[in-house]
Amino acid sequence: MRIIYLHQYFNTPSMHGSTRSYEMARRLVERGHSVVMVTSWREPRESRDWFVTDEDGIEVHWLPVPYGNEMSYRQRIQAFFRFAIGAGRRAAGLSGDVVFATSTPLTIALPGVWAARRGKRPMVFEVRDLWPEMPIAIGAIRNPLAIWAGRKLERFAYRNSSRIVALSPGMADGVAETGYPRDQIRVIPNSCDLELFSPDSAVGESFHREHPELGSGPIVLYAGTMGRINGVEYMTELAAATEKLVPSACFVVLGSGSERERVRARARELGVLDRNFIILPQLPKAQVVSAFAAASMVSSWFVDIPEMEKNSANKFFDGLAAGRAIVINYGGWQADILRDTDTGLALSRDVTVAARQISDWLKDPARLEDVGRRARALGEARFSRQKLAAELEQLLLDVVDD
């Protein structure tokens, strides 16, 4: 099977950001399939022409289209459509048995459908976030015409897909609510890279040596984007409220994003910046492993809107793979998992209450170790990347054979 895989924000382990597409594509290659990835190069580059590389057997076609979390919404929309036009032309000229297009952005459906129709082959569409539901919920899209266009594009994407892959049960529900057949939706969530992450705390010693400012107490780690939807300011307030309860605890952020300076300013205002709240630069996926191994708890934060409870946060699954207790501040299916398996806790939005909740855990190393073992076991049993890649492979084979 030859797969044309479209993902605007494809990353390798040497790059910053999610590597789901890389890991899925690599495993498809290992299983004997050919994968051609069509993606964008977001860093500055003199040439604006396509270039091709081989990434562990994946044939990657890169189109230079600058993009960053600090860009305005209008600039991002322009980047989405510039890539969509270029990717459509590129993908349509490639040979393949199936098109697999993964969002976000939702505009990835445009080159996906074009390549599928031109090549008379099926398309499978992967929903990583419900668009335009998410940008509408956070107020990024307010114009009625833009909302109408977004909903039209959403239904266009689904209508032209032979199957839909959703990253969470809530996302699957959202797709089904548009009228798409429920039996053609498959939930394949983000997964645990059990080969990359290690539950061995000795792996984290190098991170401690590199950052003596973190001290020797428990670490609560956030490794990800500081964007509008992430609400990392909550973590600064939690650090302030926890300081007297667990003076040795350190709240560490590894990342960047449009809200970085706002988060830093709030931490400074609360008097915790560079005390028990530390911001460190974002690291490539391959290097972030030691930070997870050094952590006592791995966190995932989002602003308080119901739509975010449908998310499938990478850091949640990386934490399971690393054998670390997970802490979040939202409800939904991930909160249900933590409660049902005793692998972490969902904090109150009231940081005074949340500080007491998390302090009870941070003061109990034996409990954290026990919870960490269950987290790793859960990752192995339900969210192994090998297992979920095999599910994706079978889905694509079924579509090609239809």
Image (cartoon, grey):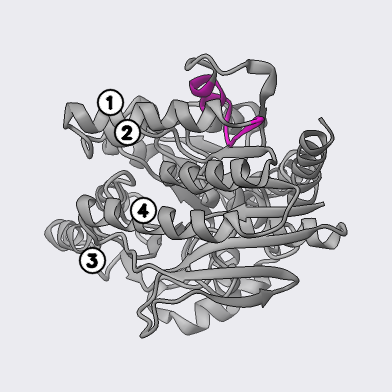
Q: Distance between the residues labelled 2 and 1?
A: 41 Å
**Image position, residue 27 (x, y; %):** 78, 58
Name the residue that disc number 3 marks: 273
The disc, 3 or 2, on the residue closer to the chain's N-terminal end is 3
User: Is tag 3's residue or tag 4's residue first in the polypeptide sequence?
Assistant: 4
Give the vertical position of 65 relative to 75 (above or below).
below
Question: Where, by quadrant of the figure, is residue 199 drawn?
Answer: bottom right
Image-quadrant location for residue 292: bottom right
- Report which quarter residue 120 is drawn in: top right
**Which residue is under mark 2?**
353
Residue range highlighted in magenta: 162-175
Residue wearing tag 1 = 148
Q: Given this view, does label 3 or label 1 mark the residue nearer the observer?
A: 1
The residue drawn where x is 35% and y is 34% is 134
Sequence-earlier tag: 2 or 1: 1
Q: Name the secondary structure under disc 4.
A: helix
Q: Nearer the viewer, mark 2 or mark 4?
A: 4
